[in-house]
Image (tube, rainbow, N blue to C red):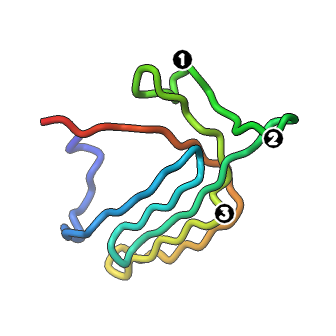
């Protein structure tokens, strides 16, 4: 992995908050990044999910096929300022252990 890193520009601590409910969700990483997602729905208005797929990383938990209605990432030290709207997203559950 270390060969993938050319230069360490910054190491920072940031509060990460997220809320997910049936494909609707928000993510915020300090002041640097934030996203809002909403699920796609099928013909019967049910939330679209993938089960038992490579996107379902937690057994028994579906991956929600969604649209990132907003994605913003800005970091001056890294030289980027990105603002995207209405891009595809996949949202799933995870659990930290250790």
Distance from the alpha carbon under mark 2 to that under mark 1: 22 Å
Q: Name the secondary structure under disc 1.
A: loop
Report the side of 71 relative to 77 (left or right): right
Closer-to-camera residue (19/15): 19
- Measuring 56% from the left and 66% from the top, which residue is drawn there? 71
Q: Position of residue 68 (x, y in %)?
A: 63, 57
The residue pinned by badge 1 equals: 52
Q: Name the secondary structure under disc 2.
A: loop
- Measuring 36% from the left and 37% from the top, which residue is drawn there? 94
Quarter containing the C terminus: top left
Distance from the alpha carbon under mark 3 to that under mark 2: 18 Å
Q: Closer to us: mark 2 or mark 1? A: 2
The correct choice, above or below, for 92 with respect to 53 in the image is below
The numbered dot on residue 69 is: 3
The residue pinned by badge 2 equals: 45
- Measuring 30% from the left and 46% from the top, which residue is drawn there? 4
The correct choice, above or below, for 49 with respect to 8 in the image is above
Q: Position of residue 70 (x, y in %)?
A: 61, 67
Q: Name the secondary structure under disc 3.
A: strand
Report the side of 27 relative to 51 (left or right): left
Report the side of 26 relative to 24 (left or right): left
Closer-to-camera residue (79/69): 69
Quarter containing the N terminus: top left
Q: Position of residue 87 (x, y in %)?
A: 68, 56
Report the side of 75 relative to 87 (left or right): left
Q: Residue furthest right?
A: 43
């Amino acid at each position: 992995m270390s060969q993938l890193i050319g230069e360490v520009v910054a190491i920072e601590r940031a509060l990460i908050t997220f809320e997910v409910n049936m494909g609707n969700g928000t993510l915020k990483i300090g002041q640097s990044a934030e996203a809002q997602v909403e699920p796609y729905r099928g013909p019967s208005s049910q939330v679209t999910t993938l089960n038992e797929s490579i996107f379902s990383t937690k057994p028994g938990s579906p991956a929600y096929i969604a649209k990132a209605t907003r994605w913003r990432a800005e970091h001056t030290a890294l030289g980027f300022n990105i603002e995207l709207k209405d891009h595809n997203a996949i949202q799933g559950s995870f659990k930290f252990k250790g």
